[in-house]
Image (cartoon, coloured by chain):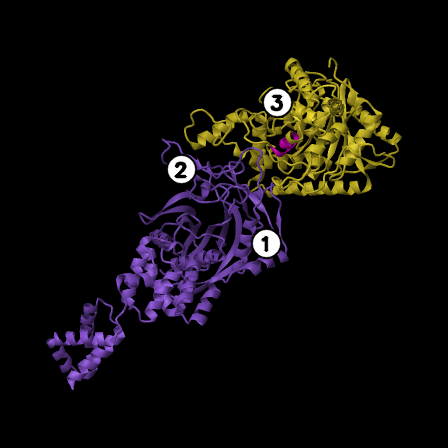
Chain colours: A yellow, B purple
Amino acid sequence: MFDKTLAELAAGLRNGDFTSTELTTAWLERIKAEDSKYNSYITVTEEEALAQAKAADEAIAAGTAGPFTGLPIAHKDLFCTQGVRTSCASKMLDNFISPYDGTMVAKFKQAGAVMLGKTNMDEFAMGGSNESSYYGPARNPWDTDRVPGGSSGGSGAAVAARLAPAATGSDTGGSIRQPAALCGITGLKPTYGRVSRYGMVAFASSLDQIGPMAHTAEDCAMMLNVMAGFDPMDSTSVDREVPDYTATLNEPLAGLKIGLPAEYFTDTLDAKVAEQVRNAVAEFEKMGATVKEVSLPRTELSIPAYYIIAPAEASSNLSRFDGVRYGYRCEDPKDLEDMYKRSRGEGFGEEVKRRIMVGTYALCAGYYDAYYNKAQQIRRLIQQDFAKVLEEVDVIMAPTTPHPAFKIGEKSNDPVSMYMEDIYTLSLNLAGLPGMSVPCGQVDGLPVGLQIIGNHFAEAKLLNVAHQYQQATDWHKQAPAGI
Amino acid sequence: MEWEVVIGLEIHVQLSTTTKIFSGASTAFGAEPNTQACAVDLALPGTLPVFNENALRMAVMFGLAVNAEIGKRSVFERKNYFYPDLPKGYQTTQLAEPIVGPGFVDIETEEGVQRRVRLHHAHLEEDAGKSLHEDFHGMSGIDLNRAGTPLVEIVSEPDMRSSKEAAAYARKIHAIVTTLGICDGNMAEGSMRCDCNVSVRPKGQEEYGTRTELKNINSFRFIERAIDTEVARQIDLIEDGGTVLQETRLYDPDKNQTRSMRSKEDANDYRYFPCPDLLPVVIDDSYIEAIRETLPELPDARRERFISEYKLSDYDAGVLSGYSAQADYYEAVVKACGDTKLAANWVMGELAKYLNQNDIDIKQSPVSADQLGGLLERIKDDTISGNIAKKVFETMWTDGGSADEIIEAKGLKQVTDTGAIEKIVDDVIANADKQVEQYKAAEPEKRGKMLGFFMGQVMKATGGKANPGAVTGILKKKLDALCD
């Protein structure tokens, strides 16, 4: 049961092979038994899950079930869930029980999904290793001494360790794709505006996007069918028709034009990772795709641009955590200023404070043009580079990360080297483009991700391409030793 | 030395939308604290703003009314600072690309000084909540009902040269926004609040002096007094060899003085940047023109019409058109009684006196325009005299009722029966030998003035109900007959 995909579990529920309550109980028991090894959950919502499973079974019996009814999933702990702690893996929100459901969470509820719990993450989604969590790092099921990636590291670890059939994540600079790659699962960051951000605790509003993390492209398609769509509560969500993403998974790929950006295959990239990615591309050639080299000349600039824009927005977004209305407030404040300083000083972790300071600095009156405006100019150039390439090819293929999972603690004292791990993922967020990470091989027993990048709103194409690859290969079916 | 005063105003106008600028919560005034603050207003994690199009429409109406360029593309920015009644830690406002560009209004002071005041721009923003410093035992309470109420901030150029001009400008803005119906104009409830930038310079000097900003003044009278006080302070300071510091000052109306709140050095760096949660607001000419079609008659046009159509004096027309509710009331009275001058005198006289004494807005007047019109009709048709009408009005104000009902109930109907008046006049003359002798002895051209005594006696005898015109005629006839 734990090796089944969402699609297979859905078929089992429909056929009456098992009930949602049986399914949910089994997963909850497995979480209880196994998660101490991975620390992938911050909160397990057993009671809610069983109640939702019961309701799902009733819907199935009554014949009112939809394709997602009764399927258990986990939500990253930065999505507001009514009546359930939404901590963002921060001391600041350790005591925060959201009084409302975010739009995406509400959509899954409406679709009849069962929420198993809330997954671990980097604090406020700031990080690429899950080490900045107030609740301790999540661990990579392929090697528990290694990071699962981040910031959606708990979701990545939970799915890889078969502690959830699928999970939601958020991606601001690679936070779905990078943990998907390092944990050997499939993840999709949709186009900016495709999924409502209402109810997602904001990190960097112009870059944040919610997406699915699962074993297969097909499962991601099923999830995106639930998540996607215009939301009047999110002014940046796009009013555009949502196709059935499962309907086009089997389109043939003959004639598909693939671009390989030269700037992604340099010394920065681990040679063994490069080899796995090239092997994957060769697989597409067998299916009739053509491959050409393309250029994304501003790739290197994406890191400095991103690390101005994201912290700048974050410094403002995180101002609301002031100890006044909710969240952490320091003991016995002397006065207002003392309350602000200590509540924020004690409530936020190191990486969050680092980014707030960087962002505050970048927005200061005297530096605004030199940093923030310049970064926005670079952002526009990066968008143009992608637009030009995507006129010539259907999809861009590249590695998701330069290396497989690194050791816990290896980079935690060197933020810049940690930031460099995001080099292949950041620029998509700057350009607002959709991207997937699909398992495409292993290096020294650790999974490697193939990144597939498409044009705005080309999610159906990306899922189609990934699904066809997964029909021809079985990297997505590999499980870590002992699972 | 002769000094010139330079004043620029920033006026915050609360727009009368039913819901907030970025959330669906109500904007009604006076509710229990925090009962009109939803998840967005509380800045709960994960919430996002959605722009209220009504606020946009109202801002465009304002821009059109002040002859301004309308921003086809306007951008919300975040103004970042920490304060407990600012839930998000930033105020969403506009800076580089506001909805209303440069415009102007023409003003006239009570003394007849006319001036064109240019507007630098006007922008949309959200109001903050309120800190409540009483009743919390050494702590402060926060009420977020007001947080997110839409504001238009109207920024003038430093074009005013006296406190009276500043007050006239503020009155003009008040007249415009209330005429447009985009603000309830209630200054006591903070619907319109004013920051005054004040500096002085030697007359003839081109360069501006250092300015101070007087914060949050909420009445026209206080605008004048605060500026006068601050101007005197600045001049004294400079003449004593000191220098004015650029700072924000607070006006204390009880002590009639200004005191320093914070200096320029303490000023925040607000770290403005475009709000990534809101798209730029893009509108086209057809949107703007559709709004232009809906604009009501504006105060300047109404004033001109009052002069040409109702034959009012410049002054009366200016006062009556200066506040839209008053102008509406006046026109309703005119419609009811058909006498433009009489209506003007009563609306600006007796009614205004009662409203002021009781601190009531004309919209809440206990005497309706129809009631007042009915009363004025009875003056016109000689049913009652002007003096009796004041008594009727007083009854109307306190007890209600139509003029006819009150006149009937109190028996105030004027006596116009000449026979009855002649009899009373005969009695008065018979009992006033001394005054009659004086009348007879007087030069004929001075006799007119001496009628007053007899008139008073007749009125006394009739309880004021005798028709004054008729009495005068009869008195004159009878007294003059005695002189022959």
Secondary structure state at the residue bearing disc 2: strand
Evaluate if marks 1 and 3 touch, with contact meaning CB atoms under 8 Å apart: no
Q: Which residue is mark 2?
A: B132
| Residue farthest along the left direction in this orientation | B434
Who comes first in sequence, dot 1 or dot 2? Answer: 1
In this view, the mark in front (1 or 3): 3
> Does residue A243 lie above or below A74 as drawn?
below
Residue at 50% from the left image edge and 32% from the top image edge: A322
Q: Quadrant of the N terminus of chain B?
A: bottom left
Residue A442, numbered label: none
Q: Which residue is mark 3?
A: A51
Secondary structure state at the residue bearing disc 3: helix
Please state which amino acid type lies under the numbered disc 2: Leu
Please state which amino acid type lies under the numbered disc 3: Ala
Evaluate if marks 2 and 3 touch, with contact meaning CB atoms under 8 Å apart: no
Which one is in front, B35 or A111? A111
Which one is in front, A220 or A142? A220
In this view, the mark in front (2 or 3): 3
Q: Which residue is mark 1?
A: B71
Which quadrant of the figure has residue A19? top right
Q: CA distance from mark 1 to mark 2?
A: 37 Å
Which one is in front, B151 or A416? B151
Q: Which residues are magenta?
A: A102-108
